[in-house]
Image (cartoon, coloured by chain):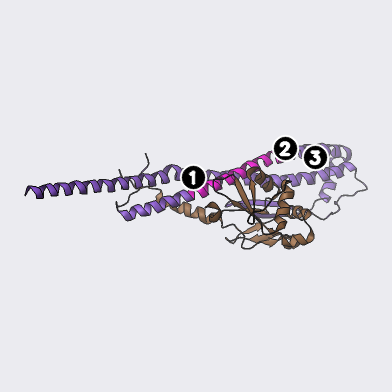
Amino acid sequence: MPQLVKVRPTKIELIKLRRRLFLAERIQKIVKDRLSILTLEFLQIARETVGAKRKLIDNFSELYRALSIAAGYHGYIALEKELIASERDLEIAAGSRNVAGTRIPTFELKEAERVIRGYNLVDTSSWLDQTAQLSEKCLEAIVVMAELQSSLELLGREINRTKRIVNALEYLVIPGLKATIKYLKMKFEERDREEKSRLKRVKVLLEQR
Amino acid sequence: MINELPYERLLQECLRGELRLLNAYLPRQQKSLADLLREEYPHLVCNDGSTHLFKRKELKYLASLIDADEQEALLLPMLIGVSSGQGEMAIICRGEVEEKVISKILDMPVTPKQQRIMIYKPQLSILRQMLKTTTQYLFSPKIID
């Protein structure tokens, strides 16, 4: 049974309650729309995450295969020496975007101008080139994955919060207001009836005199 | 029978915050695609003072869809108006560039009515998949009514 709002049984309060009900219903519509948008985005990101994860795993398995071939070809020490020489800084543009009131991080790996990889091209094989290429691909996939995963978490949390608000409105606030309005209306009708019977009683008493 | 709702004030605060939050992220002003492409970190300042970062990849994709002079006319982010309780959304467009971009992305002809292109949820998900940072939702009381 919905809980009644504590108000004085006056006409002014009834008008105020009606206004509040109208506002609550309107807010409920907006919040429901927001929830549907958030759910839509969440499902889309979840779908993308599955694809990105699969791509990441494929890229890594390819990379490990290429890396082990390169390691077998050059030897671990030589390979390590070349890899140290090819180290370079990464630049990621990090910011945020907003999805229906939820701030979501965005990451973008800045495309480096075709820099020459640090290792010696004469002494190394094409296996190493392939390994380097694949590792760049893996980096891109990691950045994409990081964005998607954090978006998924944030959206999930926001959906839960919004759902709680929608439920509170749907099952607590609006029924409470409706019940209070009904209660006040009944009270006023009861008052009218009492007034009428009182008048009748007074009339009868006056007639008896 | 009359009980005081313990969470009523809390809820009202929450709802007030909800409404404030809805359109706070809208940009103070839109920027043209050409301007954004010239920036090193293409971004916008929102109503709440936060920044909205555009992905260069998306900007380049949009630039590939239209001519150089149309890039000046395309204002970003494109606003998607949400209609209450209906399955359709309205993309607010001021010119023919938006129409061209949307029809190319969705691979179907679109016709704007009263400066609005109406799309449905399956089309919206395609659009949002392609243009994550270059589109934004708009909860307009006008549309909601």
The CA distance from mark 3 to mark 1 is: 47 Å
Q: Residues within 10 Å of mark 3 (few under 14, many from 20)?
A: many
User: What is the letter of the brown chain?
Assistant: B
Q: Amino acid at mark 2?
A: Arg
B9, A116: nearer the viewer: B9
Residue denoted by label 1: A166
Q: Position of residue A22 (x, y in %)?
A: 43, 51
The CA distance from mark 2 to mark 1 is: 35 Å
Is disc 1 placed on a helix, strand or loop?
helix
Residue denoted by label 3: A63
- Chain A drawing hue: purple
Q: Which residues are magenta?
A: A27-53
A131, A182: nearer the viewer: A182
Residue A130 seen anywhere in this rendered image of the structure? yes
**2 and 1 marks on the same chain:** yes
Q: Amino acid at mark 1?
A: Val
Specify the farthest residue to the left.
A209
* First in sequence: mark 3 vs mark 1: 3
Mark 2 falls within which chain?
A
Left or right, A105 with reference to A195: right
The CA distance from mark 3 to mark 2 is: 14 Å
Q: Position of residue A16 (x, y in %)?
A: 37, 54
**3 and 2 marks on the same chain:** yes
Residue A54's disc number: 2
